[in-house]
Image: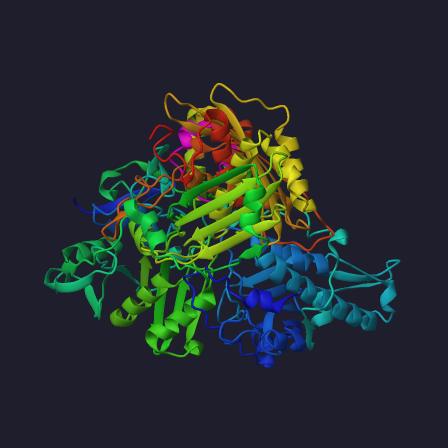
Amino acid sequence: MNVTEELAIETERYELFERPRHFGVDRRDFFKRLGGGLVVLCVAAPALAQESGGARRRGGRGGAVPGEIDAWLHVGKDGIVTVFTGKAEVGQNIRTSLTQAVAEELRAPVASINMIMADTRLTPYDMGTFGSQTTPQMASRLHKIAAAAREALLDLAADHLKTDRASLVLGDGKISKTGGAGEVTFGELTQGQKLVKSVTHESSATPATDWKIAGASLAKVDGRDFVTGKHKYSSDMSLPGMLHGRVLRPTSFHASLDSIDTAAAEAMPGVKLVRDGDFIGVTAPDALSADHALQAIRAKWTATPQPSSVELFDYLRKTASASGGRGEGRHTGSIEEGLSAASHKLQATYTVAYIAHTPLEPRAAVASWDGGKLTVWTGSQRPFGVRSELADAFAIAEENIHVIVPDTGAGYGGKHTGEAAVEAARLAKAAGKPVKLVWTRQEEFTWAYFRPAGVIDVNAGVRDDGAILAWEFHNYNSGGSGINCPYDVPNQISQSHGSNSPLRQGSYRALAATANHFARESHIDDLAAAVKMDPLDFRLKNLTDPRLRAVLEAAAERFGWRGAKNGGGRGIGLALGTEKGSYLATCVEVMADKESGEVKVLRAVSAFDCGAVVNPNHLKNQVEGALVMGLGGALFEAIEFENGMVTNPRLSDYRVPRFSDLPKIEVVLIDRKDVPSAGAGETPIVCIAPAIGNAIFNATNTRLRSMPLVPGGLND
Amino acid sequence: MPKVSELNVNGKAGPIDAEGERTLLSVLRDDLNLTGTKYGCGEGQCGACTVLLDGAPTRSCQIPVGSVGRRKVITIEGLAPEGQLHPLQQAFLDHDAFQCGYCTSGMILSGVALLRKRKNPSEAEIIRFMDGNVCRCGTYQRIIAAIRQAANKIPGDAK
């Protein structure tokens, strides 16, 4: 387990300013809270912790210190296994997959395992749920903790049953003697005990080849709560005496407040006006009264001139830094030499628009003060990051802040920050009562952050026999994730450059890998066309990575690439890629109707390899969902803005994929039990856009180089 | 709009005290604590707030509570009052037809409304009927499969 890896924040997570804090552990606390039993902690190994002060850590602040705990579990006298992790469930089904890790090692019924997640008072510090790290990092740690618990329980059982460990069998939360001569439950074994064990990241766990519960298609562990409406998201929380809040927003980004008249709002019954510098908000007994009060405020703002979406790409290029840049990069060989040996040279520019995450649950928080202590329920991928923001905003110690993240109505990388939490807490503090604040969809579309827009220049050369000889790739603004060319090209430069982003930008599922894969896989297709090779054959010729070849061949096979024909508006396209330790290939078939301008994706097949598969059905669900989500950014999603204001901040103006956009989707999973599991929430999104672009090219002979590809149809 | 003093929700008429111009969504969530019905967009575009009004799928964020009158409101909490899941709820579980689950209440109620109108809807009919409900996690294919499964399991008169 590589601690350094986890602690390094990818530099393009622009929205983050990380200040790790530590979980103070009073070991007696475990038992005070949960009663006697067995506790197993996962601590970073001291040696690794010391190594982790390396170059990739930001300013050497925080990180793993010897003895820092990442996760722990408790086996109580009732046999209930309670697991504590700071990770957040945002729809990726990690509550289920992490439960499987524990059930696997303990051979305990899934129903006896209770996951406490994303709660800054109860769970150990966690940097955040992002970067596809939960499965490779947290699941692996929970395997180790649970394996150690199992071993401790076997020791206890050997004593209890007065036999040697070799004769014991574990199953269904019980340990029995082979031959049926006695058995004992976990609860009986832990009764009256106050045992604390610890494991390190180096401890061992059951290999994937022996998995029985991990690796199986367990249903969402608390699925029933979701189909009955019982689950409480943060926006569903309610406290006695709670008020509803709204916040006054400027009329444009970076506008400054000139004058304000709040008399009418303040005269409304039950309304309290809150003013703290430029922060202006209201509270009222119900949401409608809060709306009315907000509308009654007369405010004048002075706008700041700023770029609009029509000039965006020129602006990004103009403000780009010449070198340095962000993210990874590669430089090998000589582009000049490669190009001069090439038979065909191809230069093109690709662009990618800003898009919004649009999680269906907008940012929301319920905040409550008790003296100097603050409790906040909020939907977030970074409960501990939100706690730091609150500590900064109110200048109080983190010990006095409790952030609770109920399983959240999605994030997609868009909920790394704590705006709603800070605003709700500010309103609650002024009102002297608990306050709920739910961002409107329009606020979500305007005052959250966006997936970065970008401009990408590609210059490449290919020899007549199909060998790519030169590859030069520059990304301006959108970032360096997935920027490296996976093909065997002797002369390469891949470089990401920072620019001034007119809009607030941040993480989005797969970060810049979507933009970089779009440009690369589109350009690769053009190179194939230049040498008159089939796009599949061309890629195979230039590719040696066995896992990439395997997903490409699997997707092409399932799709029926070899026999497929285009014509009559139909076209096929494919793309491949690798990012965050997983491998993807996607084939699509589109109908591109030149007459009506309509583009419909008829079919999509993705083959995906993320190492040992933890839950095949949920993994397929992620891959399918990523394809659907990616379809929006590929075809029509774009944030438009002018004079510092988003001009399409509503679902009626900003089109997201719907039932009628759905292609027939097939997913092929390549289960590599010999390889550690990688995360899977992000990478499956990266190939759909270039595959569609390539299919449109196949159907119409028109190459589209901007995402979204057809916001106004083919003829726009 | 006058105040509303009574609302029939999930099979029971009960007293409420709400300004008539407030949305049905807000009254269900904030006054009756029926939080299974969700706010998603506030303009009837996402379907997360869907409830049944006399059996018809209705965007509760768009309808003032004052205009509900004597019509019967069914929310997700009222679909399985006895703890026995509706066949469509069960089908959502069987197909893992959700990820974050925030759209699920609205999806299920829209689906129930469809199955009341059409005993065995075709895929094209499902897509047309459900197109106003958004799932950002992208589980549409599973939702279609769940509706088809439920269609086969609901006896004719129980819809």
Q: Is residue B140 magenta?
A: yes
Whether residue A481 is visible to the viewer of this picture, yes or no, is: no
Image coordinates for residue A204, horizontal then vertical, percent: 74, 65
Q: Quadrant of the N terminus of chain A?
A: bottom right
Q: Is residue A283 magenta?
A: no
Compared to residue A157, the image places residue A633 above or below, namely above
Residue shown at 53% from the left, 57% from the top: A329
Image coordinates for residue A525, horizontal then vertical, percent: 54, 35
Q: Is residue A595 left or right of residue A612?
A: left
Q: Which of the pair A443/A213 is nearer the observer? A: A443
Image coordinates for residue B33, horizontal then vertical, percent: 36, 53
Compared to residue B65, the image places residue A149 above or below, namely below
Residue shown at 50% from the left, 63% from the top: A128
Q: Which residues are magenta?
A: B126-144
Q: Is residue A268 left or right of residue A683?
A: left
Whether residue B23 is visible to the viewer of this picture, yes or no, is: yes
Q: Quadrant of the C terminus of chain A?
A: top left
Image coordinates for residue A530, horizontal then vertical, percent: 54, 32
Q: Which of the pair A537/A582 is nearer the observer? A: A537
Farthest top residue in view: A568
Q: Which of the pair A177/B100 is nearer the observer? A: B100
Compared to residue A559, the image places residue A215 above or below, namely below
Residue shown at 86% from the left, 71% from the top: A162
Compared to residue A675, the image places residue B88 above or below, namely above
Coloring basis for residues: rainbow
Q: Is residue A135 left or right of residue B23?
A: right
Please tell me in which quadrant of the rendered image residue A402 appears: bottom left
Please tell me in which quadrant of the rendered image residue A379 appears: bottom left
